[in-house]
Image (spheres, rainbow, N blue to C red):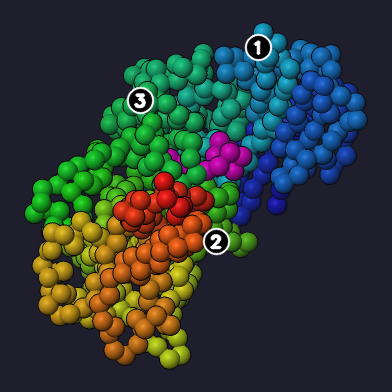
Amino acid sequence: MTQLATSATPPAAPAVLPNEQIVTDDLDLLLDALPPRIVEALRPPERRTDLLEVVMDLGRLPEARYPGREVVLSHEEVTEEDLQFVIEHIGDFGDDNRAGIERTLHRISCIRNRRGKIVGLTCRVGRAVYGTIRVIEDLVLGGKSILFLGKPGVGKTTMLREVARVLADDANKRVIIVDTSNEIGGDGDVPHPAIGGSRRMQVATPLAQHAVMIEAVENHMPEVIVIDEIGTELEAQAARTIAERGVQLVGTAHGTSLENLMLNPTLADLIGGIQSVTLGDEEARRRGTQKSILERKAPPTFDVVIEIESWKRVALHKNVADTVDAMLRGYLANPETRQLSAAGRVEIVDEPQREEARASAGLLSGGARPERTMWGEPPRRRSGGHIRDHRDAPMFEEREAPAPAPARTENHRAIHIYPFGIPRSRLEAAIRSSGLPIEIVDDVAAADAVLTMRSYYRSKPSALRDAEERNIPMYVIKSNSAFHLEQVLHQFRPDSGEIGGARAPRRDPMVDVFRETEDAIAKVLDEGRPVELPPANSYVRRVQHQLATRYNLDSTSSGKEPQRRVKILPGR
C-alpha cells in the first residue's frame, strides 16, 4: 500500500506495518519553485507518479525524467529568466553546487559555465520511504557496521535515511548523521522528520567531511554514526578511526559490488585494504600459488557489505573479512541474496547466474586449487564468505537452485582434468564457456590430463612429476587468463581425439604452429606475396615473428584480440 503525501508541512514518521511502504515526497513544494509553464505540464497525476527529476538547461527544452524514460515538458526553450526564477525560490548553493528547499528532501544541483554563471539545473525529487529496510532489519539492529553499495539512483540514500530513523526510534540509540549535502536530513536548520530522533551535523564544505566525522565522535558521544558517500582517502581513514572506537558506522560508498571496492585503491581500506606479499619458495609450492600474492592488510572497517539491487532485493556479504580473504585466495565467495516477497516474507534465494558472473569476472587471484578451505575444512558452498548455517525461521525461507550436472555427450564420457596452479574459478568459467564435457578432479591419479602454467612446469613439483611418471598428458599454458584457458580447452573437443575411453598420446601443440608457419614462409618465398596466418595468442605470434626473421622475411601483426594475427611479408 502506497500513500503519496504532497502537503506543505512534512508529516511525522508514521508507524509502518510489516508489509507496508509509505512514501512522502512534498512534491508541491518543489513545483512551487519551478516556472509556471513547467508546473502546468506536471499537474496531471500520471506525470507526478515516479517522477525522478526535472532538468532545465539554458537554450534547451525542459525535461522530466522517469525510470527508463524522459518526457519533454514544454516546446519553449529554457531561458535565463526561468533559471533565475528557480534560484530565487530555493536555498543558497554550496561549494558542491547543491541547494535545497527548507525541510524537504529535494535536491537542486547546478551547472556553471567558466565564469561561474548558472546555465543548467537538475531538480531531483527527494522522497522519504518508510519501511525500506525490512529485508535487512536484522542486520541493522545487530549492531554491526554496514556499508551500502549500489549504482546511482538505486536508493542508497533513501535506505540510509530509514536506517537512521529505525536505529534512533526503534532501537533507542544515539544516532548522529554527518550530512554533507543535506541529502539525508533535508535543507534548512530543522531536519526532515524522516530521520526520526537522529541528530544531524551539517558540513560547511565537502572537503571538511572527514573532520566533521571525527568531531561527531569526540563531542557528541554517539552510538551510531551515519555517513553518505564516503569517497576520499581521508574519509576512509576517518571511518576506520570511528569503527576502532567502538561506534557502529553505517554508510554508503561509490561502487556497485564488493569486487569494485577491492579494485578501488582509494576506498579499499574500508574492507581492510589489499597488499602484495612475496612468499618463500616452499610456502608458494605448498599453496600451489605464485610467489607474489595479494592479502588483506588490516581488519575491515565495515563488518557487513550490502549490494543494493532495489528496496526489495539485496545481496549481503555478512562477514567481510572472510569474504575478502576467500576471494584473494581464489575461492568463490558468493553473497547471500535476499528479497522481500509479496506476502512480506524475507526469502533467501540462491542464484547460479550470479556465481557464474562473478567467476567469469576474473577478479579472484592466488592460483590455488581449493581442495580444502582456508580453515582446513572440506570445501562447502559458501555465501557472503562464511558457511550458511543461520536462519531466523519463520521469517526466512530458503530457495535452493539445483546445481547443474556436468555436461556429457552421447558417445563420450566427461574428461577429467587435474589443474595445478590454475585458479579453479577461472577454469570452471572457461569450461562453462566452452560447453565441453570436462570435469575438474582433485587427485592426479584420476586425471586424464594435467593443466598447469609454464612457471610451475619448469620447477617440476612433486604433483607434476607424479603425472609424468603415470604418463598423463600435460598441457602447459603461458598465463591463466580466460582466453588462454579457453584455447587449451578447445583441444579436448570430441573430434580432436582427446575425449574417449583411451588417453591420447602427449602432443606438443606448438608442433602444428611451427608446421603451419613454415608452410606460409615457403609460400611467401615461392610466390613473393604476403600470407596471413590464422588468429593466435601473443606467445604464438612471437614465435611466428621469430621464424619469419630467421628466413629474412618481414612480418606484422594486425587486428584486435582475440582475432589478432600475423602476416608474413616478402623479403627485405
Q: Is residue 572 left or right of residue 21?
A: left
**How would you rate the neighbour count of disc 3 (Cα within 10 Å): few for under 14, some for 14-19, many for 20 or more?**
many
Is residue 339 positioned above or below 439 on the image?
A: above
Amino acid carrying label 3: it is: Ala
Question: For mark 2, what is the residue?
Answer: 345
Residues at marks 3 and 1, CA–CA distance in whole angstroms: 34 Å
Residues at marks 2 and 3, CA–CA distance in whole angstroms: 37 Å
Is residue 528 positioned above or below 234 on the image?
A: below
Amino acid carrying label 1: it is: Arg
Residue most toward the top? 115
Q: Residue 546: x percent and y percent?
A: 32, 53
Residue shown at 77% from the left, 25% from the top? 56
What range of the chain is rendered magenta? 145-158
Question: For mark 1, what is the residue?
Answer: 114
Residues at marks 1 and 2, CA–CA distance in whole angstroms: 53 Å
Q: Is residue 53 left or right of residue 278?
A: right
**Closer to the eye: label 1 or 2:** 1
